[in-house]
Amino acid sequence: MQTLGKKIEEKPWIGWVVFIITIIVVFLAGLFTYSIVERRTEAQFVFQPATDLDPYEPRLEEWGRAFPRQFNTYNRMSDTTYVSPTLGAPKEDLLEKNPNMVILFAGYAFSVDYNLARGHYYSVTDVHETLRTGAPMEPDEGPMPATCWTCKSADIPRLMADLGPDEFYSHTWAEMGPEVVNPIGCVNCHDAETMELRISQPALIEAFERRGRDITQATHQEMRSLTCAQCHVEYYFGQNNRLIFPWDQGLQAAEVEEYKDAIEFADWIHPLSRAPMIKAQHPDYEIYEKGIHAQRGVSCADCHMPFKTEGGVKYTDHQVQNPLNNISNACQTCHRQSEAELTRNVVSRHQDVQQVRDRLENALVKAHLEAEFAWNEGASEEQMAPVLQNIRSGQWRWDYGAASHGGPFHAPQEMMKIFGTGLDYAQEARVELARILAQLGHTGEVPLPDVSTKERAQAYLGIDLEQRQREKDEFLRTVVPEWLQEADERYSRWDAGESSPSGS
């Protein structure tokens, strides 16, 4: 067999071919090596801020100068046009969509105005605009304490550090209006120096401490959910409007109810049934914890803020959104099914849970109205006591599930259990009401008012929506611009070096 050297001697052109191929291979290998080095260098420097960030800098634009990729994806949350088969992002009147909630929340601000939240980008704007916050024309006016701002703004870590939690909670919502103008942002979840995930919400730290846990020992993967659990949880306002997560007995609906029963807590007294009610907030983390994804170590951010790759940089997509709008990154990194099949799986779980929720909801509305009728017929407090407890327990479970975001997907079995148990309580209340009414001499059907639309339900409760909207419009026209102007003046002082977000 001839050697390559002999072949080249006989056919010199072969040498040239080998030479050219060698040159091409070396050239391509060089390009490949250069690309690797370049990408590694890019990744090394991408997380080194171009500017020094104050530890409590609330302005997204300032963080965006150092982290443009994350900033740009965050800003995509301004687009709320996506509507999933289960829940949308646009502003939507939930009372118009579901008038039952007007009766269920009678006597509480949610019976007046309840819109679908549009996400982090609009967190401050939506709070300004909702009728629930009233129309305070002076700092000491309005129905809400400053605690209502706690989960709505990147200004909160700064204010908590400056005032301390107790003093912050002691103020009114309107007093903090000029201070709270930036939506939920980077500083809520990140340390400005190291960019590590951090907990800025005292209530979460305190809840862990009461359960004998040190949240500083949480892993990075756990933090990718715990940063969300700073806000996406059940809570209530304690003494002096202190924000408290009621997890002392556990995170399940029944355990939280046991905790609140023990301290005889009620958010309000229902004006129709006179039941002492508990308002669930948004127990997203608690329900997620009961689901298969949490059990398998999947975090909130894995699905709602999945990783992206740009050039040689892998980073977290800060467009916090419904995973159904980003299935390839959010779901198909683990699941190999098609987008259509994965969507069908999610929708079917929602539909199954919704059927039980609707039955519970209808039973509760009737229970409130029938209880009102029983009171008017002369029922005694002793007779009504077990009815009111059952209404309280049934609606607590309805609200615990209804107020959660994505609960039917996060933990469908847990949601079925919550709504199913709630339905038992609601039906027991109605059975007991029938017995009471029979004792009072009424054995026929209870005449129920027509509350089939938002307008009719609110009219039945005597809610003057037009007057409240006029007051809110005036507040938005006169007061909010003053708050924003005061904030701009504060930024000018920061930028001029006269002061800083951290107060130094």
Image (spheres, grey):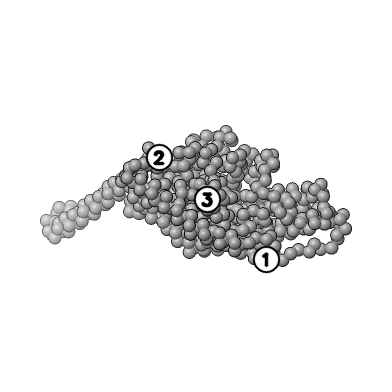
| Residue drawn at point x = 33 percent, y = 46 percent | 495
Please name the residue that numbered disc 2 is placed on. 502
- Going from the N terminus, do you reach mark 3 or mark 1 first? 3
Q: Locate residue 320, reporting x and y percent.
A: 47, 54
**How dense is the environment of label 3, judged by Cα within 10 Å: few (below 14), some, or many (20 and up)?**
few
Residue on which disc 1 sits: 456
- Is 268 positioned to the left or the right of 438 in the image? left
Q: Position of residue 412 (x, y in %)?
A: 61, 53
Q: Are marks 1 and 2 in contact (CB under 8 Å)?
A: no
Which numbered disc, 2 or 3, marks the residue that appears first in the sequence? 3
Task: Residue 503 in the image: state x and y as whole percent.
Answer: 40, 39
Q: CA distance from mark 3 to mark 1?
A: 33 Å
Q: Secondary structure at mark 1?
A: helix
The type of residue carrying mark 1 is Arg
**Residue closest to the eye, 435 or 127:** 127
**Place of residue 244 in the rendered image (x, y in percent of width and height, measured from the top left):** 58, 41
Image mark for residue 227: none
Label 3: which residue?
138
- For marks 1 and 2, the one nearer the N-term is 1
For the point 71% across and 58% down, the residue is 365
Which image quadrant: the C terminus? Answer: top left
Is residue 307 in view from this perspective? no
The answer to whether residue 68 is left or right of residue 237 is left
Please, what is the three-letter code of the amino acid marked with disc 2?
A: Ser
Viewer can see residue 274 = yes
Say what amino acid the circle numbered 3 marks.
Answer: Glu
